[in-house]
Amino acid sequence: MPDSRYLLLAAAVSAAVTWGLRALPFTALAPLRASRTVRHLSTRMPAGVMVILLVYCLRDLPLSHARAAAPLVALAVTVGLHLWRRNVLLSIVGGTAVNVVLASAVFGP
């Protein structure tokens, strides 16, 4: 069995590496916060990510089937709720609920 000095040194090295890895992102991000590029991306990225998710989720949707109505109606409800209340949580929960109800109860198997 290793002696206690070796174990304490191993624990100290592990703690130092863990602390360093957790602190590194904060020290690296500090200069980036003042960057014009990062500020520009922070205003544009949320909408871009949502568009990419929308295209990804609806890309294989067969528009010739009646079941395609559930996600499209849920999308319309999500957009409508967001434009009406400007509440992201309400929009996501409302759209998801409409999709689940339509997909399982109305257009279910």
Image: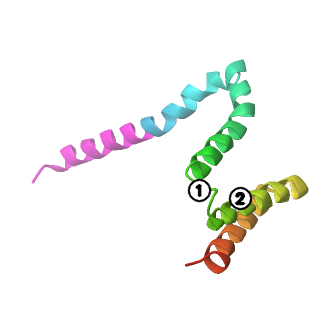
Q: Which quadrant of the rendered structure holds the C terminus?
A: bottom right
Residue holding disc 2: 72
Residue occupying image coordinates x 22% and y 48%: 7
What predominant SS class does the magenta segment belong to?
helix
Estimate how packed mark 1 is, as few (under 14), some (14 to 19) or many (20 or more) residues with alpha carbons within 10 Å.
few
Answer whether residue 16 is magenta in the image.
yes
Q: Amino acid at mark 2?
A: Leu
Task: Looking at the picture, tell me which residue is in the foreground, 65 or 90.
Answer: 65
In the rendered picture of this protein, how many numbered marks are placed on residues?
A: 2
Q: Assess disc 2: are there few (<14), some (14-19) or many (≥20) residues with their C-alpha within 10 Å of its C-alpha.
A: some
Q: Residue at x 37, y 37 (%)?
A: 17
* 108 to 23, vertically: above or below: below
Residue 31 within the magenta-colored segment of the rendering: no
Q: Residue furthest left?
A: 1
- The image shows residue 16 at horizontal and vertical percentages of 38, 38
Query: Considering the numbered disc 2 on the image, is that residue within a helix, a strand or a loop?
Result: helix
Is 47 on the left or on the right of 19, as rendered?
right
Q: Assign the N terminus to one quadrant of the image.
A: bottom left
Residues in magenta, as a range? 1-19
Extreme front residue here? Answer: 64
Front in this rendered view, residue 42 or 73: 73
Q: Which residue is mark 1?
A: 62
Q: CA distance from mark 2 to mark 1?
A: 11 Å
Local SS, label 1: loop
Direction from residue 12 to residue 44 in the image, left or right: right
Residue at x 79%, y 61% (from the top left corner): 77
Residue in the picture at 65% in, 67% down: 66
Mark found first going from the N terminus, 2 or 1 = 1
Q: Is residue 106 visible?
A: yes
Q: Position of residue 73 (x, y in %)?
A: 74, 62
- Residue 33 lies, in percent from the top left, at 68, 26
The amino acid type found where label 1 is placed reads: Pro
